[in-house]
Image (spheres, helix red, strand yellow):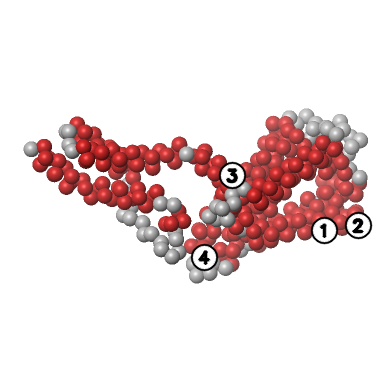
């Protein structure tokens, strides 16, 4: 009688178990195999995983309590274990995936997008250095970029004879924590505009990258011309390793969107935008993290009054770490 019940039980639920197993097999395949251009693997019938998982847990409980065949019980136990790992493993491994992305995936992705990185870097750094040089020859040029009140405020912040103000801050009463929030908001705002500008066929990204280069270059050029070299460059070079690099990277994300709209290839523009958008969002995750790191350094380190040789030494180390990070980490990744 038990055997008859078992055979009926198997016949009734076999297809559901097979569909569940096939779906698990597909999900466990590496992404590169699923999307292989030569031999792409078609996905099996999609299932409502949480609901099916609960039903199979019930089947396993019934099979165990009815003392069905050990082979059947073992199979159901295996399905339950796989389902649990699929449903809850993602939550358990969340921080592992984050660590893997920043330890390998992000730098490998940026090396893969090296052409856009160079283009974005040129859009920012060419006007940046051009303005610094131009203002040394024509100091009044700064007023074509900033108004008089902005220039005066900037001079007060970095004047070495006005240390009643904390270097790099508008008010000496601002706390480090307050300034941290201010820097994060300001930095991420710059990055988001560079990124979102790509949706205007790249025109917005081009404008914001060049504008940022001109504006920051004008500030740097003016303060350098005034001789506020140690107060200004000592303040900005440390966090600049992360902040300026993040500005360029956010430009890469915007240009990635622009490429999908301008040159979608054999895809529709919508399909190309979706595909490139997934990559651009990953790039922005990395840029956002760098903006936040830059904000921490700017709030808690850059404004400290220390011997300038220490400031420059730390800045050199930070720039070296950023360069090494993108050049060395993630070698051998699929997207490298």
Q: CA distance from mark 1 to mark 4?
A: 36 Å
CA–CA distance between discs 1 and 3? 35 Å
Nearest to viewer (mark 4 / mark 3): 3
Q: Who's the residue at 87% across and 58% down the image? A: 134
Considering the numbered disc 2 on the image, is that residue within a helix, a strand or a loop?
loop
Upstream in sequence: badge 1 or badge 3: 3
* Circle 1 or circle 3, nearest the eye: 3
In the shown orientation, is residue 275 left or right of residue 116? Answer: left
How packed is label 4: few (under 14 Cα within 10 Å), some, or many (20 or more)? Answer: some
Answer whether labels 4 and 2 touch (C-beta < 8 Å). no
User: Which residue is under mark 1?
Assistant: 130
Q: Is residue 309 left or right of residue 287?
A: right
Q: Upstream in the sequence, badge 2 or badge 1?
A: 1
The residue where tag 3 is placed is 103
Q: Earlier in the sequence, mark 4 or mark 3?
A: 3
Pointers 1 and 4 in contact (C-beta within 8 Å)? no
Find residue 207 and report its horizontal and vertical position in percent.
Answer: 70, 59
> Which callout, 2 or 1, points to the residue nearer the camera?
1
Q: Which mark is residue 269?
A: 4
What is the quadrant of the C terminus in the image? Answer: bottom right
Name the residue at 83% across, 32% down: 305
Q: Are marks 3 and 2 in contact (CB under 8 Å)?
A: no
Quarter of the figure with the N terminus: top left
> What is the x, y in percent for residue 25?
35, 50
Location of residue 228 in the rendering, given as x and y in whole percent from the top left corner: 89, 43
Crowding at label 3, few (<14), some or many (≥20) Cα neighbours within 10 Å?
some
Residue 50 in the figure: left or right of residue 262: left
| Residue closest to the eye, 24 or 46 | 24
Q: Secondary structure at mark 3?
A: helix
Q: Which residue is mark 2?
A: 138
């Amino acid at each position: 009688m038990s055997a008859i019940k078992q055979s009926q039980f198997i016949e009734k639920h076999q297809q559901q178990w097979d569909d569940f197993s096939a779906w698990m097999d597909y999900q466990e395949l590496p992404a590169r195999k699923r999307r292989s251009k030569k031999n792409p693997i078609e996905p099996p019938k999609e299932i409502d995983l949480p609901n099916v998982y609960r039903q199979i847990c019930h089947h396993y409980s019934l099979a165990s309590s009815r003392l069905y065949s050990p082979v059947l019980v073992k199979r159901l136990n295996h399905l339950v274990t796989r389902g649990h790992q699929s449903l809850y493993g993602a939550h358990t491994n969340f921080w592992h995936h984050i660590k893997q992305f920043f330890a390998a995936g992000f730098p490998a992705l940026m090396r893969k997008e090296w052409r856009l990185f160079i283009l974005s870097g040129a859009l920012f750094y060419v006007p940046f250095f051009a303005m610094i040089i131009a203002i040394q020859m024509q100091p009044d040029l700064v007023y074509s970029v900033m108004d008089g009140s902005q220039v005066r405020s900037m001079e007060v912040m970095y004047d070495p004879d006005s240390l009643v103000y904390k270097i790099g801050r508008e008010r000496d009463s601002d706390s480090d924590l307050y300034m941290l929030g201010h820097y994060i908001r300001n930095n991420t705002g710059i990055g988001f505009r560079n990124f979102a500008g790509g949706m205007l066929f790249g025109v917005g990204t081009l404008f914001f990258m060049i504008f940022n280069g001109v504006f920051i270059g004008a500030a740097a050029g003016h303060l350098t011309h005034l001789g506020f070299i140690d107060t200004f460059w000592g303040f900005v070079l440390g966090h600049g390793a992360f902040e300026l690099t993040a500005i360029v990277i956010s430009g890469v994300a915007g240009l990635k969107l622009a490429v999908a709209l301008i040159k979608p290839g054999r895809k529709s523009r919508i399909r190309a935008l979706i595909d490139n958008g997934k990559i651009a969002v990953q790039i922005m995750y990395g840029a956002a993290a760098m903006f936040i790191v830059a904000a921490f350094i700017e709030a808690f380190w850059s404004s400290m009054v220390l011997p300038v040789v220490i400031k420059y030494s730390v800045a050199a180390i930070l720039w070296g770490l950023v360069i090494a990070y993108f050049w060395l980490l993630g070698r051998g990744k699929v997207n490298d």
